[in-house]
Amino acid sequence: MSIQEISLSGRKKVVSNKEMTFLETMYLIAIVKGLWITLKHLFRRKVTIQYPEQVRTMSPVYRGQHMLKRDEQGRENCTACGLCALSCPAEAITMKAAERKADEKHLYREEKYAEIYEINMLRCIFCGLCEEACPKDAIYLTTSKVLVPSSYEREDFIFGKDKLVMPLDMAMKNTQLKNAN
Ligand code: SF4
Ligand code: SF4
């Protein structure tokens, strides 16, 4: 058996190049066959869900929308080192670093912080490599458990710090829980 004849799936079909009959040139049989396949699928169990109206139950380790975390004092952890952007296979992350001013110590944990931090969610494949690469425990995909909302506009998928940074009240609640335990 030649290598061309081997079919790994067992579903290989040899396409015939023979001339079509008059009936075949009308495509009527092909159309009826196609409609029959559609009709059969109408009554089968649906594997798709109507997102965003329906939301699938996610695994506890599901990688949701990214979150830039704050420390127990509510300061942003990210130091704009760029390692997440370097490790991103989809080149979805961009940022601009800035130096913390003397009166901003309550806002940013490190001397350098991300003035701009953006993720292009249309590029992101939710692999979690940015989370693995981060030396500051700053970026997480698992903690938010939030799906990226759907939209018809491309700009809506560029997530800046307004959408990514953990809300302050959530950080404070986490600190209270940690202190209570
Ligand atoms: S999850 Fe993966 S693809 Fe998405 S931003 Fe992080 S590293 Fe890039
Ligand atoms: S999220 Fe982490 S890896 Fe990315 S720039 Fe901030 S500190 Fe560095």
Image (spheres, rainbow, N blue to C red):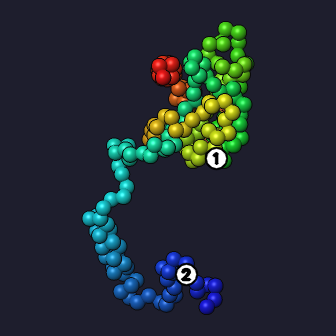
Viewer-proximal residue, 63 or 5?
A: 63
Is ligand 1 closer than 8 angstroms to the Cβ of mark 1? yes
Tag 2: amino acid: Ser
Q: Is residue 181 visible?
A: yes
Q: Is residue 28 left or right of residue 171?
A: left
Tag 1: amino acid: Ala
**Distance Cα–Cα, label 1 vs label 2:** 33 Å
Q: Which mark is residue 90?
A: 1
Q: Quadrant of ligand 2?
A: top right
**Percent coordinates x, y for residue 25 in the rendering:** 40, 83
Q: Which mark is residue 7?
A: 2
Q: Residues within 10 Å of mark 1 (few under 14, many from 20)?
A: some
Q: Residue at x 47, y 19 (%)?
A: 180
Residue furthest front as drawn: 181
**Percent coordinates x, y for residue 92 in the rendering:** 63, 41
Asked which secondary structure carries label 2, the reply is: loop
Q: Is residue 144 left or right of residue 37?
A: right
